[in-house]
Amino acid sequence: MEARNPAETSGSDGWGVWARLWTAPDDPLFLDTAGGGERLVARIRLLILFVLLLTQLGPSPVERARRPALVLLAVGLGLAGLVDLQLRRRYRPWLGFVSSAADVTLVSLGLVLSVLAGAPQAAINSRVVFDIYFLAIGCASLRYDWRVCVVTGGLAVAQYAGLVAYAAGRWGLDDPRFAPPWGMLGWSGQAVRLVFLALATLLATVVVLRSRELRRLSTTDRLTGLQNRGAFDERLEEEWSRAWRYARPLTVAFLDVDRFKEFNDRQGHSGGDAALKAVADTCRRALRRSDVVARYGGDEFALLMPETAATEAVARLEAIRKAVATAALAPNGLSMTVSVGVASWPADGASLAAVVERADARLYDAKRGGRNRVVGPEEEGNEGQAVPASA
């Protein structure tokens, strides 16, 4: 392949990198965290709207804007309640974008009401409603998606800038009618507000990116790049809860490298590490994006396949077994084999613990039956002869 000058990639290719980052599929590692953040934001939203609704019930300096504001807040509170009910059922990744955009737009509509009521000074100089923009941007960071932060902050800057531009064109920011107690901020003050909105967006985005990196480091096995046992157990509980809620099958498998200690003694730790990496890569390539593979400890791997029955999972794991057995995993061309135990819910147990225990027991059945085999529900108790390493 022809080498490219790095300078040539700074133009269109640079935009291509950002486009790929923006359109990249959601990382399953962060989906459940994002769902939890969205549910937290839904409750914060309900609280803020309820407090604002109470404040509108008291005396207001802009009486003409009171009734529209009450209607807006009541509608917003009702929609927020519906969002909260939906989130109790299921989280969708696109919901973070929609709800964040709605939060910002609701703030802007609150300011627009003051303009329509003939009190632009209350909108442009607001020291209460305007600050809710920052709450919306801060809440966007709880979604664990930097793109949501960018969309939220970008909308806040664009909508508020449009409101300021309209007020300036209609009345002028230096109109003497906007004298104290309103204290019109003028162009410099409004520019500072827009800059602070942009800075808050940048800060929220950086916080999310840093948090994602720290979470990835804390949940990743450094040798193989797979999830570690803690992350796997956490994901297992989440997928089990989802499978139980929607009555969908869930398959768990344990994969163990056969006689790895002997292999490690012959090849040394560097050869053993290379072999484990090769097994991890083989598993990663053979599974779907929604599946989970983790290094469970030492030479043992754990696999999780949502919405997959055991029979379908056994076929995939058999392909992994054959791929490992035929691969050269050491400099001198030595190969190794793996044994796999498979169990699924609800066929192999009513509880998650029962399914995990069944998969672990079948792994030992595979070991006792001669190794280099996959033992699932149909193979249990009838393991047959071990498959040769060259198979």
Image (cartoon, helix red, strand yellow):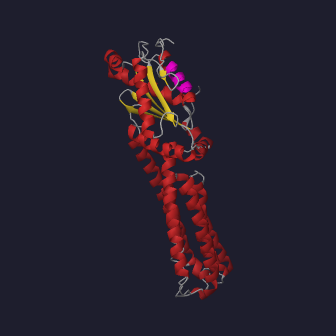
Horizontal relation, residue 387 to residue 89: left or right: left
Horizontal relation, residue 144 to residue 167: left or right: left
Residue 154, x across and y down, in percent: 58, 60
Residue 220 falls in image quadrant = top left
Q: Residue at x 68, y 79 (%)?
A: 170
**Range of residues picked out in magenta:** 314-323
Is 320 inside the magenta-drawn segment? yes
Q: Nearer the viewer, residue 31 or 346?
A: 346
Q: Residue at x 59, y 43 (%)?
A: 20
Q: Is residue 283 above or below residue 154?
A: above
Q: How many marks?
A: 0
Q: Residue at x 47, y 36 (%)?
A: 349
Assign the N terminus to one quadrant of the image: top right
Q: Nearer the viewer, residue 159 or 70?
A: 70
Q: Is residue 223 above or below residue 324?
A: below
Q: Residue at x 37, y 22 (%)?
A: 272
Is 307 inside the magenta-drawn segment? no
Residue 182, x across and y down, in percent: 54, 85
Residue 149, x across and y down, in percent: 53, 57
